[in-house]
Image (cartoon, helix red, strand yellow):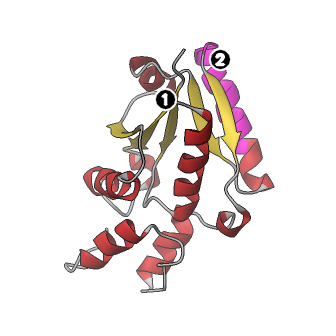
Amino acid sequence: MRKTALYPGTFDPITNGHFDIIERALRLFDEVIIAVAISQDKKPMFSLDERIEMTKEAVKSLSNVTVVGFDNLTVELAKAHNASIIIRGLRAVSDFEYELQLGYLNNSLDDTIETVYLMPKLQNAFVSSSIVRNLLKFNGKTDHILPKEVQKIIGNMTSCTLH
């Protein structure tokens, strides 16, 4: 039976840590759907379309990966795409409590969908989208923590109106 996993997140922007999790998930599952959330509550720096474009560019070399945008419950999106697994990344102990609660919530909504937690490689353990956004605000160096395709897109945003 084909196993499809859903990897939801804001991806504002997608980082090397996210990419690392995607590569790990592909070793375990037949297909990975990256679900980019609208996440208006988080007030993202990049629009949904920009985040989807960056994510698609970052993963274009990977097989069996699809990128979609969404604005509904994660378990509903998983069902709609026949995904029986939700992937979540854990960088540090501080992530664990929140992710555990989210996993239990999703399980209470649909107990046929499992949550699998994956850790990035140690070199990416400190990388988060919020760190990247802070660096971008101050024109800090980000090429070591962003996929090169994403770095190029952000660099090409010559209008420099990062939201």
Say what secondary structure mark 2 lies in.
helix
Specify whether 33 is left or right of 19.
Answer: left
Instruction: Identify which residue, 40 or 135, lies in the foreground.
Output: 135
Please say if 160 is above or below 102: below
Please say if 72 is above or below 45: above
- Looking at the picture, how far across and down is residue 163, in whole percent? 31, 68
- Give residue 108's mark: 2
- Looking at the picture, how far across and down is residue 151, in whole percent? 38, 73
> What residue sits right under mark 1 in the picture?
74
Callout 1, which amino acid?
A: Thr
90 in magenta: no
Say what secondary structure mark 1 lies in.
helix
Instruction: Identify which residue, 85 or 129, lies in the foreground.
Output: 85
Q: Predominant secondary structure in magenta?
A: helix
Q: Quadrant of residue 106?
A: top right
Q: Which residues are magenta?
A: 98-112
Q: Residue at x 32, y 50 (%)?
A: 52
How many other residues sit within 10 Å of disc 1, few (<14), some (14-19) or many (≥20)?
some
Q: Residue furthest left?
A: 159
